[in-house]
Structures are given as structure tokens and as C-alpha cells.
Image (cartoon, rainbow, N blue to C red):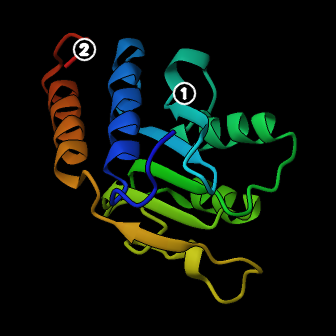
């Protein structure tokens, strides 16, 4: 169990571990964790788009699916989604539709973020549910993983664990 009053650092540490694991399959290093109201881990996920040839294989979707299976229902009311990078529109929409209570993320995604950067899907008043958003937890480490990964990609470097 994760202490939910610890400023989300323990949950982000778990998500960062998932992000590092994504590197083994040449996936973008993004990790996610879903916690219930008591801080119990219901689901974890990492990007699996490359590994599973799945365009929806984003860390958040993987973690939300695992949490829904663990809970035995798709409504994740009271739960928290913790993710290393600001969710994209698909993942922000999935968080809203799953009815999570809050989204906690590390680094902002200025190119595709949908929780405050480029769009703000999670707080759109036209939708029927708006989770609380907490930002900046583990931002430096999350951003460093991504910078190193994409730096290697641009340089044509060999894949592998950072």
C-alpha cells in the first residue's frame, strides 16, 4: 500500500520504474499507476505500443484497464491515476470516462498534453466528470528519461535500457 498523503512521491517512483521497463521494448518511457482511495495499487502500466503493435498501448490505458479488471468494474471513482508524463487526449479522455478522482503527472507535454498544456480535456466543463489535477511530481526525472530516449532516437543510437 502507498501512503496517499506522501505527496505522491512513492506512487511516482513506481510509475518511473514502469517507464524504465518500457525501454526494454523500445517503447517511449512512460509509466502509470492507479491507486484506490486507500493507496492500494490496482493497476500499473507502461507504454506497450511497440511491444504489442497497439496504438492504444499507452501507459495510462494499460494501467486503467488493469485497475478496472482488479476492481471488477469500469468505474474507478475515488481512484488516482499517477503518470510520468501529462496524458494525451486519448488518455485524458480515458481518465475522464473511467471517473478517476484525480490525475497526478510528472512532466508537462507541450506538444500533445491534454491536462493543461496543449488542451485541457480533464477540466473541460462540457464533460460530465472533471478529475483534480496535480502536476510536477517527479517531473525532472520523468523529463530526463524522455530526453535521453529521444536523444538516442535522433542520433540513431542502439535501443536499450537507460
Q: Is residue 96 left or right of residue 133?
A: right
The answer to whether residue 143 shows anywhere in this view is yes
Q: Which residue is mark 1?
A: 49
Which structural element holds mark 2?
loop
Residue 116: quarter of image: bottom left
How many marks the image carries: the answer is 2
Q: Residue at x 59, y 42 (%)?
A: 40
Among the two numbered marks 1 and 2 on one chain, the one whose residue lies closer to the N terminus: 1
Mark 2 crowdedness (10 Å alpha carbons): few <14, some 14-19, many ≥20:
few
Mark 1 crowdedness (10 Å alpha carbons): few <14, some 14-19, many ≥20:
some
C-alpha span from label 1 to label 2:
17 Å
Which residue appears farthest toward the right when viewing the image? Answer: 73
| Image quarter in which the C terminus is found | top left
Q: Is residue 158 left or right of residue 107?
A: left
- Is 94 above or below relative to 45? below
The one nearer the camera, 1 or 59, is 1
- Percent from the top left, x then y, of residue 55? 61, 34
Residue 25: quarter of image: top left
- Percent from the top left, x then y, of residue 137? 29, 57
Q: Residue at x 68, y 63 (%)?
A: 78
Q: Residue at x 33, y 60 (%)?
A: 7
Which structural element holds mark 1?
helix
- Percent from the top left, x then y, of residue 103? 51, 62
- Is 76 above or below relative to 116? above
| Mark in front: 1 vs 2 | 2
Q: Residue at x 43, y 50 (%)?
A: 3
Which residue appears farthest toward the bottom when viewing the image? Answer: 125
Look at the numbered discs 1 and 2 and tell me whether their residues touch, using CB distance below 8 Å.
no
Q: Which residue is mark 2?
A: 161
Amino acid at each position: 500500500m502507498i501512503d496517499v498523503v506522501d505527496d505522491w512521491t512513492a506512487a511516482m517512483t513506481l510509475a518511473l520504474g514502469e517507464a524504465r521497463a518500457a525501454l526494454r521494448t523500445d517503447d517511449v518511457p512512460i509509466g502509470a499507476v492507479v491507486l484506490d482511495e486507500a493507496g492500494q495499487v490496482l493497476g500499473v502500466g507502461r507504454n506497450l505500443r511497440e511491444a504489442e503493435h497497439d496504438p492504444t498501448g499507452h501507459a495510462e490505458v494499460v494501467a486503467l484497464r488493469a485497475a478496472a479488471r482488479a476492481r471488477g468494474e469500469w468505474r474507478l471513482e475515488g481512484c488516482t491515476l499517477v503518470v510520468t508524463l501529462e496524458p494525451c487526449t486519448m488518455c485524458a479522455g480515458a481518465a475522464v470516462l473511467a471517473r478517476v478522482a484525480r490525475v497526478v503527472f510528472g512532466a508537462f507535454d507541450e506538444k500533445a498534453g491534454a491536462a493543461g498544456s496543449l488542451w485541457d480535456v480533464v477540466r473541460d466543463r462540457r464533460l460530465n466528470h472533471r478529475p483534480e489535477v496535480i502536476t510536477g511530481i517527479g517531473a525532472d526525472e520523468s523529463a530526463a528519461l524522455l530526453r535521453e530516449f529521444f536523444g538516442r532516437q535522433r542520433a540513431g543510437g542502439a535501443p536499450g535500457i537507460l
